Amino acid sequence: METDEVMHQLDTLLEKVESLIERCQNLERENADLSGRVKKLESELEQKTENENQFSRQKEQIRSRIDHLLAKLDSATENPAAEE
């Protein structure tokens, strides 16, 4: 009788171990999926950041050109005889 009880406990323990192994495998797959997703999101964020930086540089260049043209215009209106 004692042997039957030990065998039953071993069977129960085996089921629990198998369940834990399956759970670990599921978590490993989920972790791999999430890691891939994080890498993809990081890549997208990096690309967006670079696009924003490029946009800022272009905006600054445009602003600089406009300021330069406005300065020329101011200079031309102050000295109209210099251009004639």
Image: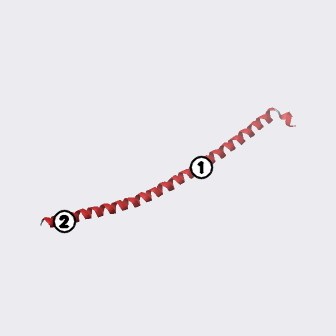
Residue at 19 percent of width and 66 percent of height: 7
Horizontally, is 38 left or right of 51 in the view?
left
Nearest the viewer among 83 and 23 is 23
Q: Quadrant of the N terminus?
A: bottom left
Q: The C terminus appears in which quarter of the rendering? A: top right
- Of 66 and 24, the residue lying toward us: 24
Choose between 67 and 30: the one closer to the eye: 30
Tally the marks.
2
Q: Mark number for residue 69?
A: none
Q: Residue under circle 1? A: 50
Instruction: Residue 65: give x, y in percent of width and height.
Output: 72, 42
Residue shown at the point (15%, 64%) measured from the top left: 5
Q: x and y percent of residue 54 in the render?
A: 63, 48
Amino acid on which the number 1 mark rests in the picture: Glu
Left or right of 84, for residue 13: left
10 up-or-down from 55: above or below? below
**Residue 55 vertical placement versus 10 (above, below):** above
Circle 2 is placed at which residue position? 8
Residue depicted at x 47% and y 58%: 36
Find the distance from the CA under tag 1 to the CA under tag 2: 63 Å
Disc 1 crowd rating (10 Å Cα; few below 14, some 14-19, many 20+) is few
Q: Nearer the viewer, residue 58 or 47?
A: 47
Kind of residue at badge 2: His
The colour scheme used to paint the residues is: secondary structure
User: In this picture, is 31 found above or below 70?
Assistant: below
Q: Secondary structure at mark 2?
A: helix
